Image (tube, rainbow, N blue to C red):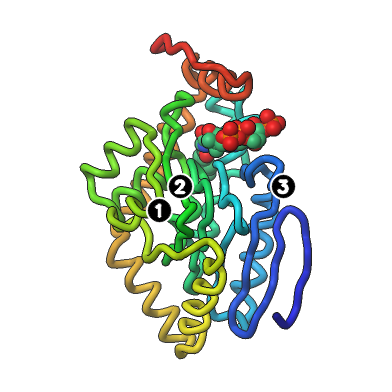
Amino acid sequence: MTSQSAVEPILTQKDGGVAVLTLNRPEALNALNHPLMDRLEAALKSFAKDDSVRCLILTGGPKVFAAGADIKEMENAAAKDMAADPHLSRWDMLGKFPKPVIAAVAGYALGGGCELALACDLIIASETAVFGQPEILIGVIPGAGGTVRLAERLGKARAMELILTGRRVNAKEALALGLVNRVVPPEGLLEEAMALAQNVASMPPLAARAAKASLLHALNAGQNDALAFERRLFYDLFDTQDQKEGMKAFVEKRKPRWTGK
Ligand code: DAK
């Protein structure tokens, strides 16, 4: 590794043409709170401009990728608070990052954590990885691209099942579903991601960017509309009792009682 800067709660590292971003909030399973997302956005902005960076790895380290957006931060929000929250726009940065991004996922990648991985171009999973969109279990829906990007990778039937039930899938099933590129033993995760990233980084950078842009363009016609629609429905659910109950129940470590209101 050539340089290292430790900026909590995101660690950044550069190795040749590859930058590694590590989510670093282990006490909350890397739950994605505002300070973490602020730092992630700042790091992405800086690496987007840095011509020496040709490929990015996003990881949560060897134990957990991310257990989602921070439920404790949004538990009491109303729909209008969510819609007016400037922090939430930070979530768009990764999907719009112009250079190839590889997610290296170990442990839980749930909710917003799964959506972060899905916004990456390639996903290398440790055998310990667990993916899922459990938002429905706390009274909401995926709001950062899950309904759009999971359906893109898995197709309607499989994405619908996972989003309607909140069921988690392990690394093996994720591979069979086409959610990830490959599965590796836990100890080989970063090494495998780095080897792939170095390979991508050795390609002519303008062609690599053009390849990514073209592939996303081909896949994403209509995606902006879909993302905006998803986000609006997600926000609206914050004016329901079921969202308050679902998130409160999570924080209080009990089963929610749904009223359909
Ligand atoms: N938020 C806050 N804290 C969390 C958390 C989360 N998502 N996940 C875990 N933690 C905290 C726990 O509260 C606990 O804290 P303490 O009680 O120790 O203070 C600590 O991390 C360890 O968690 P557990 O005790 O629960 O650990 P377990 O091993 O028993 O269970 C678990 C691990 C991952 C199965 C469980 O923690 C869990 O179910 N977590 C919640 C998963 C989840 O529901 N994720 C979806 C959240 S909603 C948007 C942007 C983003 C989003 C939407 C819109 N826009 C830009 C519009 C995203 C939304 C979401 O992600």
- Name the mark on residue 171: 1
Q: Is residue 131 left or right of residue 46?
A: left
User: Of the residues shown, which amino acid type is indicated by label 1?
Assistant: Ala
* Residue 163 locus on image (x, y percent): 35, 36
Tag 2 and tag 1, C-beta contact below 8 Å? yes
On whether ligand 1 comes within 8 Å of the CB at mark 3, the answer is: no
- Name the mark on residue 130: 2
Kindly report the distance in space between the C-alpha atoms of the residues bearing marks 1 and 3: 29 Å
Q: Residue at x 60, y 58 (%)?
A: 62
Q: Residue at x 60, y 52 (%)?
A: 63
Task: Give the quarter of the figure containing the N terminus.
Answer: bottom right
Q: Which residue was labeled with disc 3? A: 35
Callout 2 crowding tier (Cα within 10 Å): few <14, some 14–19, many ≥20: many
Query: Looking at the image, can residue 20 be seen?
Result: yes
Q: Residue at x 69, y 72 (%)?
A: 13
Q: Secondary structure at mark 1?
A: helix
User: Of the residues shown, which amino acid type is indicated by label 3?
Assistant: Pro
Query: Looking at the image, can residue 84 be seen?
Result: no
Task: Give the quarter of the figure containing the C terminus.
Answer: top left
Q: Secondary structure at mark 2?
A: strand
Viewer-nearest residue: 25 or 155:
25
Viewer-nearest residue: 96 or 196:
196
